[in-house]
């Protein structure tokens, strides 16, 4: 497992479903999941895929991601970047996403738990909460 903060290309946050940026997005997703210590099951739920679909997507030389998957990855990239700005280390980023948090929208659940259990809505709620914190 790598312990260095990764540089994610700026264009990942501006992905368009019509562009073939699936490979970059999927690489960013894989690195973020590695730093978050996300299990394969969590990865499947984060992208709303089955296990076989996830493995096929990861093994394709130029994967095509749908609009929903791109939205999920774009939001996770923004969450990751906000955590990096706040903590600056992989263990800090991992702790940020794995530790239970009080209040809305978490209610004593961890951000990863919210994202996995509530899908795109949970990912976007986490994004909103994390970016609001970093703005303060």
Image (cartoon, helix red, strand yellow):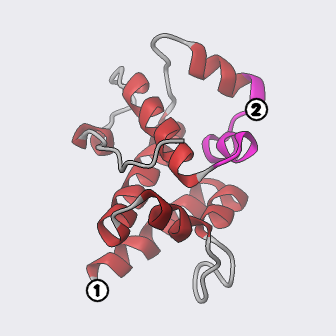
Q: What residue is drawn where x is 60% and y is 82%? A: 101
Residue sitting at x 33%, y 34%: 16
Q: Compared with residue 28, is residue 98 higher up or lower down, i.e. above or below? A: below
* Numbered label attached to residue 136: 1
Q: What segment is highlighted magenta in the picture?
A: 38-52
Foreground pick, 128 / 33? 33
Q: Position of residue 13 (x, y in %)?
A: 31, 45
Q: How many marks?
A: 2
Question: Given the current orientation, which residue lies at the most extreme top position?
Answer: 61
Residue 112 falls in image quadrant: bottom right
> Farthest bottom residue?
103
Mark 2 element type: loop
Q: x, y percentage for residue 45?
A: 70, 46
The x and y percentages for residue 70 are 46, 38
Question: Residue 105's quadrant in the figure?
Answer: bottom right
Q: Is residue 59 magenta?
A: no
Location of the C terminus (image quadrant): bottom left
Asked whether, in this view, residue 22 is left or right of residue 96, the answer is: left
Q: What is the CA distance from the residue labelled 2 to the residue labelled 1? A: 38 Å
Judging by the rendered image, the residue that carries numbered circle 2 is 50
């Amino acid at each position: 497992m790598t312990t260095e903060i990764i540089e994610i290309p700026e264009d990942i946050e501006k992905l368009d479903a019509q562009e073939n940026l699936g490979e970059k997005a999927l690489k960013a997703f894989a690195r973020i999941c590695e730093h978050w210590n996300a299990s394969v099951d969590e990865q499947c739920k984060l992208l709303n895929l089955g296990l076989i679909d996830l493995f096929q997507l990861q093994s394709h030389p130029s994967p095509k991601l749908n609009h929903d998957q791109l939205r999920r990855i774009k939001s996770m990239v923004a969450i990751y970047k906000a955590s990096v700005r706040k903590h600056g280390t992989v263990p800090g980023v991992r702790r940020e996403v794995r530790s239970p948090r009080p209040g809305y929208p978490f209610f004593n659940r961890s951000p990863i738990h919210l994202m996995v259990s509530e899908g795109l809505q949970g990912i976007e709620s986490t994004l909103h909460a994390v970016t609001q914190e970093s703005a303060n």
